[in-house]
């Protein structure tokens, strides 16, 4: 197992940090972002959006800390958490695709890309990817 955080993992944290900031702001201003996703803004959907924004802000902050960390053991649990969160998000998107319609394409792309990046980072850091290729 690599003790140092690899450049690919740092890049994954940086990409997540940028996308996370964008989505956090979007979730915190549901009056503007809800129509972008084909949703009608209501007080209830706005409240739920802001709660999701708070969760997104927390996960985004962990990517900031992951980016500035030096050792894999400091961020391993963060990467595992991201994988679980993103896998759950993908399942929720699939189940609710009819709610979002075509606007869900952006969410699918972002969630799948981040899931793959974090999964590859984990496999690479744990040196599992080399074992799989053999």
Image: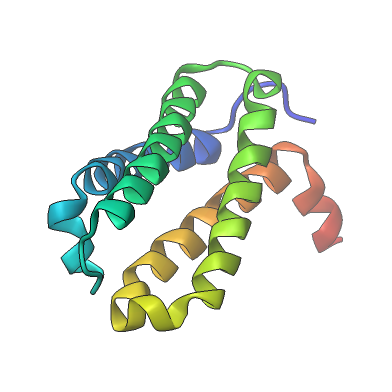
For residue 15, say whether it is visible.
no
Q: Is residue 90 rendered to the left or right of residue 21?
A: right
Q: Residue furthest front?
A: 43
69 lies above or below 22: above
Residue 10 in the image: x percent, y percent? 48, 33
Lateral position of residue 99 relative to residue 69, left or right: left
Residue in the foreground of this view, choosing between 23 and 4: 23
| Residue 54 in view of the camera | yes
Viewer-proximal residue among 46 and 97: 46
Q: Quadrant of the N terminus?
A: top right
Closer to the camera, 41 or 108? 41
Query: In the picture provided, is 100 more to the left or to the right than 55?
Result: left
Which residue corresponds to the image point at 25% horizontal and 52% vertical from the top-left? 43
Q: For the point 69% across and 30% down, which residue is it? A: 77
Image location (x, y in percent) of residue 21 = 29, 38
Relative vertical location of residue 74 with respect to residue 106 in this rendering, above or below: above
Residue 16 placement: quadrant = top left
Q: Residue at x 47, y 42 (%)?
A: 12
Q: Position of residue 118 (x, y in %)?
A: 58, 47
Above or below — where is 65 with respect to 46? Answer: above
């Amino acid at each position: 197992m690599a003790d140092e955080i690899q450049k690919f993992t740092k890049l994954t944290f940086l990409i997540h940090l940028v996308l996370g900031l964008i989505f956090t702001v979007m979730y915190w201003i549901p009056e503007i972002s809800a129509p972008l996703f084909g949703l009608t803004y209501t007080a209830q959907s706005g409240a739920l959006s802001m709660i999701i924004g708070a969760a997104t802000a927390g996960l985004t902050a962990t990517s900031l800390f992951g980016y500035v960390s030096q050792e894999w053991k400091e961020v391993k649990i963060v990467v595992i958490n991201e994988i679980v969160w993103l896998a759950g998000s993908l399942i929720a998107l699939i189940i609710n695709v009819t709610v979002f319609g075509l606007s869900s394409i952006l969410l699918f792309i972002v969630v799948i890309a981040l899931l793959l990046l974090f999964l590859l980072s984990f496999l690479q850091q744990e040196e599992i990817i080399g074992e799989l290729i053999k």
